[in-house]
Structures are given as C-alpha cells and as structure tokens.
Image: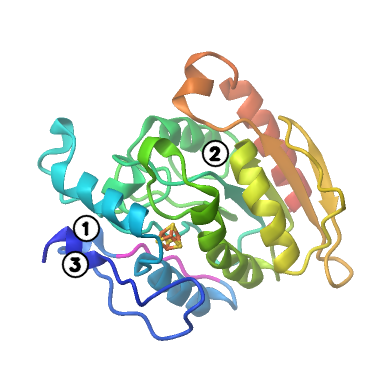
Amino acid sequence: MDASDASDASHTPDSPGTPRARSGRSGRFAVPVEAGGGSGPALVELDRRVAGCGACPRLVAWREEVARDKRAAFADWTYWGRPVPGFGPADARLLIVGLAPAAHGGNRTGRMFTGDRSGDVLYQALYDVGLASQPTAVSVDDGLELYGVRVTSPVHCAPPANRPTPGERDACRPWLVQELRLLRPTLRAVVVLGAFGWQAALPAFAAAGWVVPRPRPGFAHGTRVRLDGPQDGDGLDVFGCFHVSQRNTFTGRLTPEMLCDVLRKAAGAAGPE
Ligand code: SF4
C-alpha cells in the first residue's frame, strides 16, 4: 500500500461512521492505542477515526508528499503520513495541546511530538516532573508511557511550514471537541503551547461544555484561566506556555525551567491521579 492510500476524504471530523482500519504496514506503525478509564474504548475509536480523516485536501497532499519524499536521514523509515491522533490515557487529568504534527516528527512516527526536537524538549520536561516514564520519544514502540497526561493538537495533520490555515484549524476542531468530551470526566487542567493552540482550543473548550469568558482571554506564557464546567467539580484550569518549537527553545525564549514550572503548576491543579 502506498502512503497515498491513507487518505479518506469521506471520513471527516463530523462523520459518525465506522472508520476504515487504519493500521500501518507493520506493527511498528499501527495507530497508537492508549486505553484507560471509562472512556477508553471510545477514545481508541476516536483515535482510529482521526487517523483516517481526509477532510483537508492541502494537508492530505502535503502529509503524503512528505511521506513519499522523506528526509535523507529517515530514508529507511516508512512514514506514517496520516493524521496523528492524541497520545496518552483516556483518564488523563492533564492535557497538553500543541499546534500540529511536524512533517518529519509525528508525521513520520505516527505519535504526537515523537521523533523531533520539539518532542525531545517536551518529553524530557514531562519526565523531569514525573509525568512520563522516560525522557525520550523516538517511535511508537519505544515504551514511553504518560502518567495521567494526554498530548494532542488542534490540527492533526502536518501542515506546510508548520502553518495550518484558519480554515484547516476550524475543520479539525470537531476532533478536539470530541476528544475533550471523552476526557471531561477526569480532565482538570490543560497546558496550551503557543498562541495558535490557544486560539484553537478556547472555542473547543466552549463546544465541549466549559464556560469560556467573553471576551476570550488572550494568550501569554504563564497565564492561567479558570473555566467552569457544566457541573460542580469539573472546572478546568487552562495554562498558557510558549510552544516547544526549536525557535523558542534555541533562542531561550522558552527554557526547560520555564516549561517544567508550567507543567508542575498544571499537574498541581489537575490533582493526584
Ligand atoms: S487537519 Fe484534521 S480535519 Fe484536516 S485532514 Fe487532518 S485530521 Fe482531518
């Protein structure tokens, strides 16, 4: 099967139908599955449906072109070349929301923030604050486990120049809304990485049942916003954090200490497992 077979334009964020099987060409590239808690099977199903989405023609073309052409350093890889689902347990109390998979990172490995320098920074920090089993993330079968944390993004396909269009952001939002609804029974805190994720996530929080103030609070590193939930006790603490992009980490705009500080605060707000 060629990577171009992976797209399924009939399967979109709003289509409720049963997804086609999206397993890769080897077990190494199977859709990452993380069950746990009462929403586990539903979240596994959602992840499978996400991995089969073909709603954005530009992103479908790009993710598959990258998967065909590859980067020389990864010439022996069979790229995932499809939407990258969220990663982490269904009973997560903390969610990390990024931007979109990297062309030669998540789009290659099939797992969020896995196989690129942004992921190196993020998973090292999660490990340092006790939320991950190991500091590295290189492939879906590397043994990495997250403790009470799930990692996702508002756009599930790698975009050219790491820049999804507003239309692509909006097209992908229903996936995030569905994911948030499934996580809601346990989810108590979110770290949003960067302004793009912030702008994409706030409407999704509202659509998933939390009360988002109007006007919507702006993004800033270190900001913290409390969102009331539909019932007592299911409010959400949302933290802003600069994105773990190379541009931010190489320039020192975001240091490991700054990232760990936000993660520790968010984990504290999320409460014990
Ligand atoms: S970005 Fe989202 S909505 Fe668009 S094709 Fe990828 S998974 Fe589907």
Q: Residue at x 38, y 75 (%)?
A: 11
Marks 1 and 3, Cα distance to the nearest angstrom? Answer: 18 Å
Q: Is residue 222 above or below residue 15?
A: above
Numbered badge on residue 28: 1
Mark 2: is the Cβ under 8 angstroms from ligand 1?
no
Residue 96: where, in percent of width, then height? 59, 48
Residue type at mark 3 is Asp
Q: Which residues are magenta?
A: 31-36
Q: Quadrant of the C terminus?
A: bottom right
Q: Nearer the viewer, mark 2 or mark 3?
A: 3
Q: Is residue 152 visible?
A: no
- Left or right of residue 205, residue 104 in this image: left
Which residue of the protein is positioned furthest toward the bottom in this rendering?
Answer: 17
Marks 2 and 1, Cα distance to the nearest angstrom? Answer: 24 Å
Q: Is residue 40 visible?
A: yes
Numbered badge on residue 105: none
Location of residue 44 (image quadrant): bottom left
Name the residue beneath numbered marker 3: 5
Mark 3: is the Cβ under 8 angstroms from ligand 1?
no
Q: Residue at x 18, y 61 (%)?
A: 4
Location of residue 266 (image quadrant): top right
Q: Report ligand 1 position as a quadrant.
A: bottom left
Q: What is the secondary structure assignment of the residue under circle 3?
A: helix
Q: How many marks?
A: 3
Name the residue beneath numbered marker 2: 126
Mark 2 vs mark 3: which is more N-terminal?
3
Mark 1 vs mark 3: which is more N-terminal?
3
Location of residue 272 (image quadrant): bottom right
Q: Residue at x 55, y 49 (%)?
A: 166
